Amino acid sequence: MMNEFNNPNETLWDGIFPEEDVYQIEKFFDNIEVKFLVDWYYKNINNQGWHIQGGNLNYIENFKEVSEILLPKIQKHFGEFRLYNQIHNDEHPHSADFFIEQTKIFAPHTDAITHIPKWLTQKDIVIPLWIENDAEVYTYNFNQRCYRRSTHFRKGSKDTGLNVYSNALRETYDIEGIKYLNGNEIDYDFVENHIGDRFSPTYFEGMTVHSIEKNIPGNAIIKDTALIHGPSNYHLKGASKKLNISIRMFKKIDDWNPDTTFSIRSFEQSKNKRVYHNA
């Protein structure tokens, strides 16, 4: 078991943005828009598991019918923010801004994109669109924050899956850029109610619950990118899958000059590994 980093010299970003609470925007998409988006997805994409098709990333704003609904709402609510595909020059694009039909539960993680000069992710948006059997499912957010690039928290795991987008912490969370750890404590009630046996309780060592957000189709869940978070185990609640839209919101920071290394690891050897396939 070891911690793995895509860029050992990544630039940390604590102190750049205020630490704000999680909130929801009710009816970000109205019922008619939700139905259109669900129908559109299953008619035009219907690629179970992820937005990745044939090894390529498909950004949601590239779909004309979808962007005509989505982009004006982002402009209305978030004005000065931009999406990844509007600002990057990466040879191998990052994972951001997509439909996801999720069938398996992801470990706690963050989704920060930190290598683009003058632009840094401040907010993440998750918009549930459809939940099988109308099950009551949730997204959890911890009090703990990670001021590194996107990172997966898998303490004690013996897995070897990694991708060029995210770090993987398997040995310890007590490293620079991780804040507010609650020692070695584990909230076993949270694990029992929201995770079950999907992951070892050690994944949640040092984590304390900030909020549990009910997934309501059409509502947008807005959170700081630094917050460690994940989906509750909706399999425990009677659903085997759900459909979301996930968005990364960048804010312009004129003096943000990070190390621009995307990854020291091989993209061809790493792309579409376990974390970015529902397999």
Image (tube, rainbow, N blue to C red):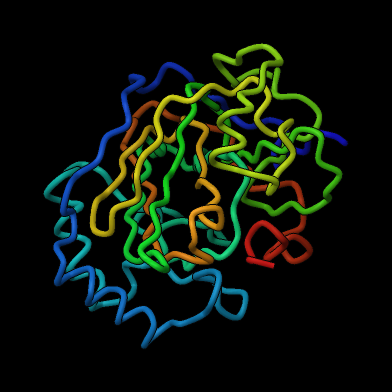
Residue 196, by quadrant, is top right
Front-most of residues 216 and 8 = 216
Question: Which image quarter holds the N terminus?
Answer: top right
Q: Is residue 183 above or below residue 158?
A: above
Left or right relative to 101: residue 7: right
Q: Is residue 200 above or below residue 217?
A: above
Front-most of residues 67 and 202 = 202
Residue in view at x 49 percent, y 54 percent: 237
Front-most of residues 218 and 264 = 218
Left or right relative to 164: residue 1: right
Total numbered labels placed on residues in the image? 0
Residue 244, by quadrant, is bottom left
Left or right relative to 205: residue 39: left
Residue 207, percent from left and from top: 59, 23
Residue 252, percent from left and from top: 31, 36
Residue 70, percent from left and from top: 22, 62
Residue 258, percent from left and from top: 53, 32
Q: Is residue 115 above or below residue 134?
A: above
Question: Which image quarter holds the C terminus?
Answer: bottom right
Residue 246, by quadrant, is bottom left
Residue in view at x 74 percent, y 30 percent: 202
Residue in view at x 68 percent, y 24 percent: 205
Residue in view at x 18 percent, y 67 percent: 69
Left or right relative to 46: residue 38: left
